[in-house]
Image (cartoon, rainbow, N blue to C red):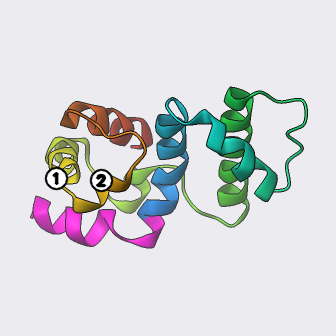
Amino acid sequence: MRKIWYSNFIRQPGSYSILLPYGMEYNGEVVPQRYGIIAEAMGLDTTKKNDRECVTAATEKLREFSQRIGISERLSDWGAKESSLEDVAKMALKDPAMVTNPRRPNHYEEILAILTRAL
């Protein structure tokens, strides 16, 4: 059942929308310089912002947009249960797409922390 939850839930567009701001914060710790470009693409003025402020501004703007169009900020709204998160984090660590992430987690607990915050 948990494997079904990972393949049928985490890969749903809604869950990506929920997890994206958390992933931006996670990745922003190692590649904050990329977020100035993202913030500018979102229409934000970045001229007086440093890289870290751009991470925060872009993440906040995305959350505002998601809220405006009715996307939940919580995985639990989609039926996720805390008891499933550890297995999901372990499966996500093995996901082939993880190799393209700018910040590669070394252990599933890093992913679990993100999922727990999003729950």
Q: Which of the labelled discs sits on residue 14, or is there none? A: none
The quadrant where residue 1 appears: bottom left
Q: Is residue 93 above or below residue 52?
A: below
Residue 28: x %, y % from top left: 55, 36
Q: Which of the labelled discs sits on residue 94, or is there none? A: 1
* Residue 43 left/right relative to 116: right
Q: Is 66 in front, or is 33?
A: 33
- Residue 7 part of the magenta-drawn span: yes
- Please identify the dominant SS of the magenta region: helix
Would residue 61 be seen by someone viewing this image from the given angle?
no
The quadrant where residue 52 appears: top right
Determine which residue is flagged by label 2.
98
Residue 88: x %, y % from top left: 20, 51
* Residue 18 left/right relative to 67: left
Question: Label 2 is placed on what type of residue?
Answer: Met
Which residue is pictured at 54% across the width and 57% down the height?
72
Neighbour class for label 1 at 10 Å: few (<14), some, many (≥20)? Answer: few
* Residue 92 left/right relative to 50: left
Magenta-highlighted residues: 1-14
Marks 2 and 1: in contact by CB < 8 Å? Answer: yes
Q: Is 30 in front, or is 22?
A: 30
Helix, strand or loop for disc 1: loop
The quadrant where residue 35 appears: top right
Q: Is 77 in front, or is 61?
A: 61
Residue 8: x %, y % from top left: 25, 72
Neighbour class for label 2 at 10 Å: few (<14), some, many (≥20)? Answer: few
Which residue is pictured at 70% across the width and 52% down the height?
38
- Residue 99 part of the magenta-drawn span: no
Residue 19: x %, y % from top left: 46, 52
Which residue is pictured at 29% across the width and 53% down the height?
99
Which residue is pictured at 25% across the width and 42% down the height?
82
Helix, strand or loop for disc 2: helix
